[in-house]
Image (spheres, rainbow, N blue to C red):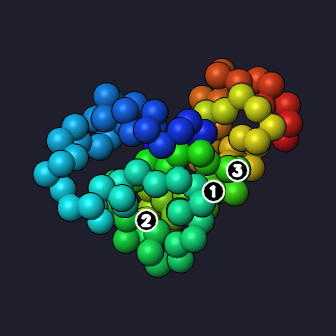
Amino acid sequence: MVTGDHPSTAKAIAQAVGIIPHDMHSYSDEVVKAMVMTASEFDALSDGQIDQLQVLVIARCAPQTKVRLIDALHRRGQFCAVTGDGVNDSPSLRKVSFFSLLFNIVISEFTLLLF
């Protein structure tokens, strides 16, 4: 999950929708830190380190961070869906699959006009 929200807000949302577990106290500090990080922490990682991450929530995300995450998912052979409603979302929207682009046509005509 990638969001511009504060890390604590991102963590709460991710827990509510089942992306990360509610019982974070049963995990090591290192694992917890890897589950929820800021964009600046993510950006400091090498591609190899990113490829080793299992569960991830990135808070305070910038456009280039979204693109880097999409690239990492594509290296894993994963599909990626992105929604967005502003100019800052256009770089990541250009990187996603056709199906998610169609989804975005319905969600955000404004963003697609930026292409």
- Mark 1 crowdedness (10 Å alpha carbons): few <14, some 14-19, many ≥20: some
Q: Going 31% across and 28% down the picture, which residue do you hit?
A: 16
Q: Going 22% across and 46% down the picture, which residue do you hit?
A: 24
Q: Where, by quadrant of the figure, is residue 67 drawn?
A: bottom right
Q: Compute the Cα span from label 3 to label 1.
A: 5 Å
Amino acid carrying label 1: it is Thr
Q: x%, y% of residue 57?
A: 43, 48
Choose between 26 and 20: the one closer to the eye.
26
> Extreme left residue here?
26
In the rendered image, the quadrant that contains the C terminus is top right
Circle 3: element type = helix
Would you say the residues marked 3 and 2 are in contact, meaning their CB atoms lie under 8 Å apart? Answer: no
Q: Is residue 25 left or right of residue 58?
A: left
Residue 95 visible somewhere in the drawing: no
Q: Going 30% across and 55% down the picture, which residue do you hit?
A: 32
Q: Compute the Cα span from label 3 to label 2.
A: 21 Å
As drawn, the label of residue 76 is 2
Disc with the residue nearer the chain's start (3 vs 2): 3
Compared to residue 89, the image places residue 46 above or below, namely below
Would you say the residues marked 3 and 1 are in contact, meaning their CB atoms lie under 8 Å apart? Answer: yes
Choose between 62 and 74: the one closer to the eye.
62
Mark 3 vs mark 2, foreground winner is: 3
Q: Is residue 1 left or right of residue 15?
A: right
Would you say the residues marked 1 and 2 are in contact, meaning their CB atoms lie under 8 Å apart? Answer: no
Q: Is residue 36 left or right of residue 64?
A: left
Circle 2: element type = loop
Which residue position is annotated with label 3? 63
Q: Is residue 65 left or right of residue 10?
A: right
Q: x%, y% of residue 41?
A: 53, 63
Which residue position is annotated with label 1? 65
Q: x%, y% of residue 6?
A: 53, 38
